[in-house]
Structures are given as C-alpha cells and as structure tokens.
Amino acid sequence: MKSLIKVALLLFAAFASTFLLLNLIGVLTAEQIEQWLIQAKGTSPIYLGTVIVSLLFLDLFIAVPTLSIAVLAGYFLGLTYGFLAVIIGFNLAGIGGYCLSRLYGNTLFRYLIKDEIKRNEAIDIFQKHGLVTILLSRAMPILPEVSACLAGMMNMAFKKFLVVWLLSSVPYALIATYAGSISTFDNPKPAIYTSISLSVFLWGCWFIYRRWVKQSTY
C-alpha cells in the first residue's frame, strides 16, 4: 500500500504544483477563464466549444478548475452543446493520461519503486481498488487525472478503464452543465448549489467506501 500511495502522492504533487504556480502568477484562474469565455461568447459555438475542450484537455498537464469550466460551458453553450464539449474534454484528458502513463509510466514506476515485489503489490492493490478510485475521483480536483495516470501505469485494461471513466464523467458533466444552463449572473444559485452538492455526495461515497474496506479487512 505504501508504494502505491508514494506514486499517487508524487503525481498529485506534480499536478498541484502547476495549479499553485499558475494561481500565484495569476494565469488560468477561474476568473480569467470566465472572462475568456465571455469574450468568446460572441463567436461561433464551435469556436467556443473548442476553447472549452482545449481547457479541459489542458488539465492533464496543468491543473485547471474543471468544475467551474463545466458549469460555464452549460451557461454559455446550453445543456446539449455544453455537455458535448465537456465530455469530449474530460475524455481527451483521461484517455491521454492513461495512454501516456501506459507508454512511459513504467520507467517512472521502476525508478520510484525499485523493489519488484513492492511494485507487484502496488499493482495488485490498484487492480483491487482502482475502479472505485476512478469512479469517485471527481470528489476533488486533480484526482481524476492522477487516477487516469495510475490506471495506465498499473496496466489496467483499457476497456475497463474507459467504462469506469465514462461512468464517472458522464453524470458529472451532465449535472454540471445542466446547472450552468439554468443559471444566470443574477441568479447563480443553481451552479453554486450543484457544485457543493456534487462534492458532498462524492465525499460521502468515499467515506462509506473507506468504512466498508476497513470493516472487510477485519
């Protein structure tokens, strides 16, 4: 377990450092992204959708506020086109993280965990709990990308990864874009309440799962 946590924490720290750095220098903040989308609103929906997809894909390399972008996508593009843009962006980031880690992550994995027995142990643990980790990963920022990278690094079957990634991403994207589509600047309550509710629900699921795991080990 310690070996898997070590790798996960390193990935998390790498993503978090980009988020902190960009916020310190005032680049890619939620307010700045909102202003970009406002400026792009007067252009074609295809262009605006491309901007949203690009921002969500960029989250694979530089942590961005994905929930805020998803809500804004619903606000600016409406439910249908907003959801389409968000789910494409989510999938590009997730599949990209999985594929890059499947191709190159093994080198990093071997460097971090030199003991083959511990590496195999980490893989076994992720194979056992990885599906739930991906399914509930949107409980907090950065965790979706970390879980996608771990899935590739730990050799999870691509079909299995894709199914559980979609199960995690589709409802999340649909709820967030719907909240954005029924919100206005004068009445942002649907977006605010939805953001809070999603986080609380997913954290609640994490809490229940952790208790179940602890009880099952005794």
Image (spheres, helix red, strand yellow):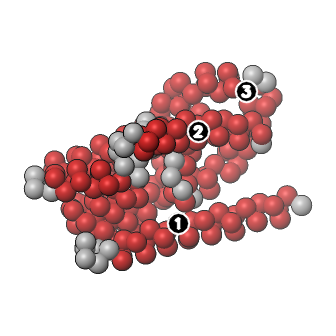
Q: Amino acid at mark 1?
A: Ser
Q: Nearer the viewer, mark 2 or mark 3?
A: 2
Classify 10 Å Cα crowding around label 3: few (below 14), some (14-19), many (20 and above): some
Nearer the observer, 18 or 59: 18
Q: Earlier in the sequence, mark 2 or mark 3?
A: 2
Badge 2 marks a residue whose secondary structure is helix
The amino acid type of the residue labelled 3 equals Ile
Task: Locate the C terminus by quadrant.
Answer: bottom right
Please determine whether, in this image, residue 47 is positioned above or below residue 167: above
Q: Is residue 58 left or right of residue 127?
A: left
Q: Which residue is pictured at 46% across the width and 38% down the height?
A: 21
Q: What residue is disc 3 on?
A: 113
SS of the residue at dot 1?
helix
The reply to whether the C-beta atoms of the residues labelled 3 and 1 are less than 8 Å apart is no
Q: Is residue 69 above or below residue 24?
A: below
Disc 3 is placed on an element classified as: loop
Residue 28 relative to residue 200: left or right: left
Query: Crowding near pointer 1: few (<14 within 10 Å), some, many (20+)?
Result: some
Q: CA distance from mark 3 to mark 1?
A: 33 Å
For the residues marked 2 and 3, what is the alpha-carbon distance in whole angstroms?
17 Å
Residue picked out by circle 1: 199
Q: Nearer the viewer, residue 86 or 127?
A: 86
Percent coordinates x, y for residue 96 in the rendering: 43, 37
Q: What amino acid type should be assigned to the residue bearing mark 2?
A: Ala
Please tell me the numbered disc located at residue 13: 2
